[in-house]
Amino acid sequence: MRWLPGKKGERKLTMAVLVVVMLGMLTAAAAFRRETSQPAPVEAEAPGAVLPLSGWRILVDAGHGGYDGGARARDSGVWEKEINLAVARQVEKALVNRGAEVFMTRDGDEDLCSDDRPAHQTMKRQDMENRVAKAVEAKVDMVLSIHMNEYRDRGQSGPQVFYRQGCDSGRLLAGAMQEALITHLEPKKHRAALAGDYFILRLDVPSVLIECGFISNAAEEKLLLSPAYQEKLGHAIAEGVESYAEVSQGMR
Ligand SMILES: [Zn+2]
């Protein structure tokens, strides 16, 4: 910046004015950032008000549970099943706030196995079949399966969404979900949605398996264990559902 000519007093005054203007600009920028990064307020539930997801029936599946702990967080030793449930509850809350009717495959530390399991069926298989059966029974429009990722290379991080190969609505939902997770969580690593062969994705309704992040990555494990980040995840996932609902209008 070119120094403004003038007497000492005038210079001081000019400096003061400049400082005030710059402070004002900084405050405005901060306020703008606060405003844009905050979740949209839930509309007041006035009678007859239509929320963005009203009419949607959604199954939220907290992966693993009971005998099946899933992966184990590398530093804390916390089982994946616990984090999945905590995040699934946040997803449920965020979806209900947007007007959706939400069903949970489990709401405690339990698997979906029963004692009358046929001899040829593994516990894992029965557990998975019962999760899919819940979606069919509840006649849901969508399935969201919540998981945490792990990998031996501790450098891997970032959320990753999977859909079933050949399911167009699932691919569309996965794309919207992956984008929402990147926008709202701002992870270091930006991944793209991928096709994956998972039992829970075999329904005809749009279904995605969301690996929320890597519990084998030290920094991401800390985030995934924090209730504030879990709430943020719930919000981001609901935003993904909402943007899918917008683009798929007319497809239903
Ligand atoms: Zn898992």
Image: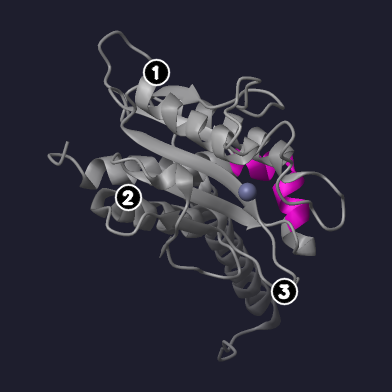
Residue 161, image x, y percentages: 47, 56
Q: Name the outermost residue toward the right.
A: 76
Range of residues picked out in magenta: 221-232
**Quadrant of the rendered structure where residue 21 is?**
bottom right
Residue receiving disc 1: 44
Query: Which residue is disc 3 drawn over?
Result: 155
Other residues around mark 1 within 10 Å, as few (<14) / some (14–19) / many (≥20): few
Q: Residues within 10 Å of mark 2 (few under 14, many from 20)?
A: many
- Residue at horizontal 36%, vertical 58%? 175
Q: Quadrant of residue 57?
A: top left
Judge whether 77 appears above or below 128 on screen: below
Point 17% across, 36% down: residue? 252
Image location (x, y in percent) of residue 139: 32, 23
Q: Earlier in the sequence, mark 1 or mark 3?
A: 1
- Front: mark 2 or 3: 2
Q: Residue at x 27, y 40 (%)?
A: 245
Q: Is residue 77 left or right of residue 161?
A: right
Cα–Cα span, label 1 and label 3? 43 Å
What x and y, as percent, mark residue 36? 46, 49
* Residue at x 70%, y 39% (from the top left corner): 81
The residue beneath circle 2 is 170
Contact between marks 2 and 1 (CB within 8 A): the answer is no
Sequence-earlier tag: 2 or 3? 3
